[in-house]
Structure formats: structure tokens, C-alpha cells
Image (spheres, rainbow, N blue to C red):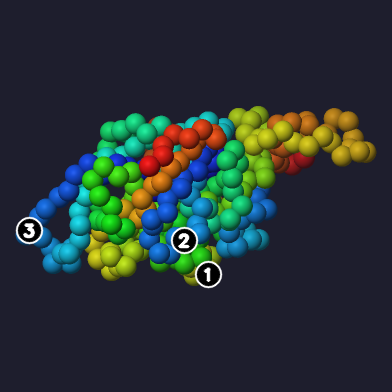
Amino acid sequence: MQLGRVVGTVVATVKVPGLTGVKLLVVQPLDRALRPVGGQVVAADAVHMAGPGELVYVVAAREAAQAMPDPFVPVDHAIVGIVDAVRTLAGDDPAAPRPSPPPAPGEPAGGPPASGPTPLARRGTRGRAPS
Amino acid sequence: MKLARVVGTVVSTINSPAFDERTLLLCDLLDPSGAPAGGSMIAVDAVGAGAGEMVLLLDEGNSARQILAAPGAPIRTVIVGIVDEVTGGGAGDADRD
Amino acid sequence: MLLGRVTGTVVASRKEPLIEGWKLLVVRQLDAENREAGGYVVAADAVGAGVGEVVLYATGSSARNTETTRDRPCDAVIMAIVDEWEIGGREVYRK
């Protein structure tokens, strides 16, 4: 599965029977720093709620058809989720999809920054002294 | 299968039902020496992998559905192992860190 | 799926029996700005598209998921005729 940004919509009246009512969206695939990578594709919206501007994840190939209400459809890219947040390792490329909401009242100062990714705890580091 | 390093998580509330209760991890693809091979993928975690770990990534739908016991699921990329060591990969063998 | 423009037809009188009966069309890939993207594909037609039309085509094993191509060897199928598309709210193409 890949990250992508919905950048447009496609309207097609004449299409194969199983795709009636299915929304078709133009998606720009992204790398994990949310930079465009590769060409844009048209993906079927399997979550029924994706729209332009949204950060999504897309499944490609035959599995895309499995996401559709009728799985016997010629669909090779499908939006299978809308991304709320991408959290990367501390010190990694920032990849927050959108500015985080302001900190909740009472959140201690010096907590995670209000914008940007929330660092993950690093795990499985061999040879590291126990903290 | 491919080698990859877990670099983050993807959080999603609105998703295809097959993804409910599943952990999505963002992985950078690696070459056998452990160096970034370019590109990243989102994978469903089947083994309890954590951030920073080197993992084995399987990118084939039938296998993915078998491992997750999810027939008909629109899932094709799954983390199927946590790598302890890779030997013979050239340019210094990679270990999990 | 990819956007494409049908630019021609392919006739092959001697062919694998499983692919008999299809209309085969040459499809030039388009980018999202309606420019030719360089590649082309020969696709089976599942919707009655004609030369000059802008279409959507699916590739890979998904291309076998139409009544026309069911259980037959196919790696590209035209599955929709495009009326219009827009990028960032701007209309790029209208039939």
C-alpha cells in the first residue's frame, strides 16, 4: 500500500456495470515525506468518503478490486483508507499530514510539539543500555 | 519478500473494514546490505514489529490474505518477520539495527 | 487506472483462441494535464469505446475482472469512457 494525495476527480458515465456509483479520484502517490513520487493514477474510492486534498492510502493491483462492493470489477488502484496521521521516528523526515490540533488544555509544556510528527519510541535497538 | 525498516505508523479512522483493528506501519525498503533501496511502503503488521526494526516484507495478495486469515481483504503488503541478521548481502552484513 | 486516448485499432486474424472476439484498441497514456505521457498499451474494450475517445483503462490481473475478459488472458482493459475530469477544482478535460 502507498500514501497518496487526492488531487482531482474523474467523471465517466459509460463504464463497466460493477462500477456504477463508484467515485473515481485522481491520486498523486507520495513518498513517506509526502513528496510526490511517480505519475498520477485514477483510483476508485473504496471508503466512499475521500475527497480532493485528502491524504489517503491506496492499494494497487488485483487487491484493489477486492476493496470494492462488487469485487469482480476491473479496478487496479483503490483508496482503502483516509490517513489521520503519519508518525515517524524521532529525527526522521517530518511527515505530518496536516497541522495537529492545538494541545489539549492541561497538556504539560515540553510535550510533543503542536505541529509535526509525534516521535515514536525507538524499539529493538540491540546493545543499548536499558534505560 | 523484501527487506525493510519500520520508520513510522499510519493512523486511519475511515478505512476499508478489512483494516479495522490492524496496525499499519510505514517501511523504507532496504537492499540486502541494509542500505535504503529507495521507496517506502505501508504494510499491515502480522508479527508485532516496532519502529526502527528491520523486517521482512511480503508484497503479494494471496499470501497476505492467507497470513492474516482474511479472505477477500484488499490487502497485499504484510510484515511477516523481524530480521535478526542478513549475511552475504555485500558491503557489510546488515543486522537489525 | 490510467487515463488514455484511443488512437487506433489492432486487427490480428491469427491469435490465441482465448482472446478471440475482442475489440483491441491502441491507447496512448495521458497524464492528468491531458498531455500524452509517452506510453501506450493495446487494450481490450469492455465498454464500446471508439477511436478519439478519452478512456480509463485498468492494467494487471484486475483487467480480467469484466464480463468481456473474465477468465481470459488480458492485462489491459478499457473500463470507462471519460466525460470530464478536474484537478484541484480546475476542469482539465470535458468530452
Check the residue under mark 3 and report the chain it is in.
C
Crowding at dot 2, Cα within 10 Å, few <14 / some 14-19 / many 20+, comes out as: few
Q: Residue furthest front?
A: C95
Amino acid type at circle 3 is Ser
- Label 1 sits on a secondary structure element that is loop
Asked if badge 3 and badge 2 are on a common chain, one would say no
The quadrant of the image that shows the C terminus of chain B is: top right
Residue drawn 48% across the image and 52% down it:
A44
Is A108 situated left or right of B86 in this image? right
The residue beneath circle 1 is B69
Name the residue nearer the viewer: C31 or C52: C52
Amino acid type at circle 1 is Ala
Amino acid type at circle 2 is Thr
Residue drawn 53% across the image and 69% down it:
B69
Residue drawn 51% across the image and 33% down it:
C90
| Mark 1 vs 2: CB contact within 8 A | no
Is C87 situated left or right of B25 in this image? left
Name the residue nearer the viewer: B37 or A99: A99
The residue beneath circle 3 is C13
Is A13 situated left or right of B5 in this image? left
Q: Which mark is residue A20?
A: 2
Q: Which mark is residue A40?
A: none
Q: How many marks?
A: 3
Residue B28 percent coordinates (x, y):
51, 40
- Label 2 sits on a secondary structure element that is loop
Crowding at dot 3, Cα within 10 Å, few <14 / some 14-19 / many 20+, comes out as: few
- Label 3 sits on a secondary structure element that is loop
In the rendered image, which quarter is residue A80 located in? Answer: bottom right
